[in-house]
Structures are given as C-alpha cells and as structure tokens.
Image: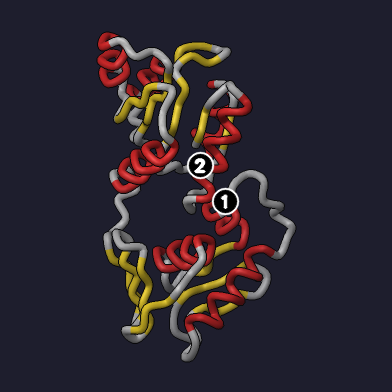
Amino acid sequence: MVVEDDGNLRLALVTQLRSAGFVVDEAGDIATADRFLRGTHHDCVVLDRMLPDGDAIEYVHMRRQLGWRAPVLFLTARDALADRVAGFEHGGDDYLVKPFVMAELTERVSNLCRRSAFDRPSVLHHEDLVMDCARREVRRAGVLLTLTNKEYAVLEYLLTRAGLPVRRADLIEHCWDEQADPMSNVVDVVVKRLRRKLKEPELIHAVRGLGYRLGSR
C-alpha cells in the first residue's frame, strides 16, 4: 500500500514497485488509505507522514493500539532525529527521508514484506511442485520454471490454499491491484500459462462457477 499526496511522486512509487513485482494499492490521504487497510491484508505500507488529513504517525499509533501488525515504512522530508524517533515510537518499522533512490525504497519494501505478519512459510510445496519463497524459485520435479511476476503470485496464492477451491475474485484481490477489472479474464489467461509451464500431470483444476483449485484430482 502506497499513501502519498503528491500525485507525481505517488505515480513514480507505484510504477517502481509494480515493475519490481509487487501488487500495489494507492491512496492520497489517510481516509482513503484506511478504507483499503481495513478491508485487505497488506504485506507492507509506505506512508508519507504529512498528508492532507493529518500526520500519518498518529494514524499508525492508533491502529497499533488496536493490534494492527502490517509493517510500515514512513516516507518523509522531515529528517531531524526527533522526527525519526517519533516515527519508530508511534509504530513505524522503517523511515526513509526524501529525496531517496528508488532502488533503496524497493529493497526496504522487500525486507519489510519478508517480515510481514502474514508469516508465510519459506518453502511451499505440493507433491513434486516446490516454491522457495525466499529465492522466488519454483521447481516441478526438480526442474526450475521461469514464471512472470503475476504467474508467481497466482501460483503462490493457490499453493497456500492447496486442495481448497479459490474464487477468481480472491485471486484478483490478492494478485492484482485496484485497477484490475474483476469481470475480465486476466485470471484465466494467467492460469492457462501456468498450466502450460507446469506440464503434466495437471495440478491446477477448474472449479465450475467458482475459480480454481491446486491439487490432485
């Protein structure tokens, strides 16, 4: 989740993170961000401190008191030591001062995502399919597969729910951002490519009227 009121900077941040393989929601103020954050799990939240409707550290402090655990990176031009300390004291996990290098931001977001409260196992597997989440590598019967970022995201989500039916709407929510059209066939297109790359025996099965299931017949 990227929360930044400067439209040009927000566009640059979102473009950078999406190109690095992240699914990104975006907002320009606390109120809009709050609607996203209360309805969807996020592995990392990048928050500009001074937003049109308040100082983001107050929002984070309030949410932390209610048990919210998503990692937060404060992004701000306020570089005084007292500001940095306040960010951490109010529940921030990292603090990056503007101006910054996009590559550094991406690395910091990656590190925070690995610490996310979702607590995914480092390795996911089903039968002869193995996904090394730390290395972002997938092997079938020992053979390394080359997957796009979206193929990897869909397969990861299916693997975490192996044996269970997964709705297309859930795949859209977790593997795409808010710009994705829930009525489009983007999920079916990605699953078709995945099936081709995974080869036989088939592991991803259609569930009529619902979505897909990863597992044996």
Residue 208: horizontal and vertical position, in percent? 65, 75
Quarter of the image where one finds residue 113: top left
Q: Is residue 171 left or right of residue 158?
A: right
Residue closest to the eye, 176 or 48: 48
SS assignment at label 1: helix
Alpha carbon distance from label 1 to label 2: 8 Å
SS assignment at label 2: loop
Residue closest to the eye, 52 or 143: 143
Q: Is residue 138 above or below residue 39?
A: below
- The answer to whether the residues at label 1 and label 2 have Cβ atoms under 8 Å apart is yes
Amino acid residing under circle 2 = Thr
Instruction: Determine the residue positioned at 52% across, 69% down.
Output: 165
Residue at image mark 2: 40
Q: Is residue 148 left or right of residue 65?
A: right
The answer to which of marks 1 and 2 sits earlier in the sequence is 2
Residue at image mark 1: 173
Residue 169: horizontal and vertical position, in percent? 62, 56
Instruction: Determine the residue positioned at 44% across, 79% down.
Output: 215
Single out the residue that lies furthest toward the bottom.
200
Residue closest to the eye, 195 or 167: 195
Q: Specify whether residue 117 is in view.
A: no
Residue 198: horizontal and vertical position, in percent? 48, 82
Residue 95: horizontal and vertical position, in percent? 33, 25
For the residue carrying disc 1, how many other residues have a C-alpha within 10 Å: few (<14), some (14-19), or many (20+)? Answer: some
Instruction: Determine the residue positioned at 54% across, 28% down.
Output: 33
Amino acid residing under circle 1 = Glu
For the residue carrying disc 2, how many other residues have a C-alpha within 10 Å: few (<14), some (14-19), or many (20+)? Answer: few
